[in-house]
Amino acid sequence: MSLTIGIIGLPQSGKTTLFHALTRLDESKRGSSSGQKPNQAHVQVPDQRLERLSALFTPKKTTPATVDFLDVAASGADSQEKGALGKRVLGAFRTVDTLLQVVRCYDHDYLGDAKPVDDLENLELELLISDLTVIQNTLERNRKMAADARMWFESVVKALEDGTRPPADVVAKIPESAKPFVQSMSLLVLKPVIVCANIADGDIGSEEGNARVVAAKAWAEANGRQFFTVCASIEEELAQLEPEEAKTFMADLGIKESGLDKIIEAAYRSLDLMTFFTVGEDECRAWTVRVGACAPEAAGRIHSDLEKGFIRAEVVTTDDLLAQGTYAACRDKGLLRLEGKTYVVHDGDILNIRFNV
């Protein structure tokens, strides 16, 4: 399951600095300064559980789950368009799974005073207008669209024209006849959104006393967004350090989680995703699957043949296997279970699939 996170924000919000920090890109791999070439990177998901399992099995290969990040810088041509981002920039984000909205929450001599709520509302408005244009064009081109599909789109248009996102009950009731159109349009307003407040290094540990952070958080909560803070400039410094040095630096600053950890956690929650593992002497690997998936679906993440020929799965929790040290010890204590097709996989489960094709 490929997970793509689009880092979006108004100019000078710190989004590209954060992108480079999260992905540890060097200058040779960065997008062009003209903004014509998107910044894209494939990033391993940090997971201490996988590290501990790998230490236990010492496999030939350890394979973490991965996340793709996308950042698109505005070009001179984009700046001529109405709005701060432009059609090309917003269009690039239609392919992502979730949007990470970065907003500046510190004053700057050159950039001026931070107005995070205004920035968030302006960014939201650009997303709404972009989708409104796409939907209206689709309705115009498809005059014979099914009545229930047209009614649903018109209800979305009404919300967008009012300057708001469509209500949750509208989003949840997309008629079957509208779904092909919805899928082809990849509407921005239907994507989960996470708000990231970019703070100054002097505000680390005292975010609750920062009025701008408090206001941004209140806006995010009122609009159903997940929210967290990060200092993009510090994240960029951490990215240049070796892992042990970075841990020491974070401890000195009182940073409990890296920006990457926060983003991954928020993205998984917003998309209802979780992690399961397969382990052995050849490979220890993390897999991403949706929350609520049954064992055959998880098996299909490993290989389609495993889902088609699924018989049952041997299941043990990561905590139990690490505590006992071996499969045999887990089996002796009744911690290793055989589960069938209706078993709902839990985060941290270790699966060994039995199948027959």
Image (cartoon, rainbow, N blue to C red):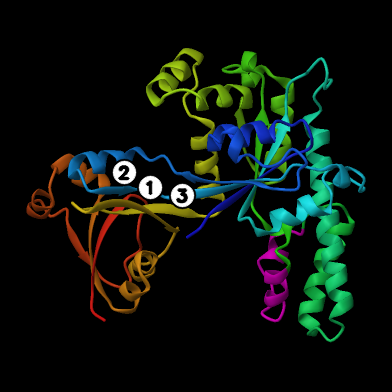
Residue 142's place in the image compared with 352, above or below, is below
Q: Mark 1 and 2 residues: CB-CB less than 8 Å, in contact?
A: yes
Three-letter code for the amino acid on which mark 2 is drawn: Leu
Give the image location of residue 274, x and y in percent.
43, 52
Q: Mark 3 and 2 residues: CB-CB less than 8 Å, in contact?
A: no
Residue 39's place in the image compared with 354, above or below, is above
| SS label for mark 3 | strand
Q: Is residue 311 left or right of residue 86?
A: left
Is 169 magenta? The answer is: yes
Mark 3 lies on residue: 66
Q: Distance between the residues labelled 1 and 2?
A: 7 Å
The local crowd at label 3, few if under 14, some if 14 to 19, many if 20 or more residues have their Cα within 10 Å, is some
Which of these two is toward me, 152 or 287? Answer: 287
Residue 303's place in the image compared with 145, above or below, is above
Q: Mark 3 and 1 residues: CB-CB less than 8 Å, in contact?
A: yes
Mark 2 lies on residue: 50
Tell me the number on the disc at residue 64. 1
- Write down the region rendered in magenta: 166-184
Q: Distance between the residues labelled 3 and 1?
A: 6 Å
Q: Which of marks 1 and 2 is nearer the N terminus?
A: 2
Three-letter code for the amino acid on which mark 1 is drawn: Pro
Judged from this view, the residue extending furthest toward the front is: 28
| SS label for mark 1 | loop
Q: In this view, does 2 lie to the left or right of 337?
A: right
Give the image location of residue 22, x and y in percent.
55, 35
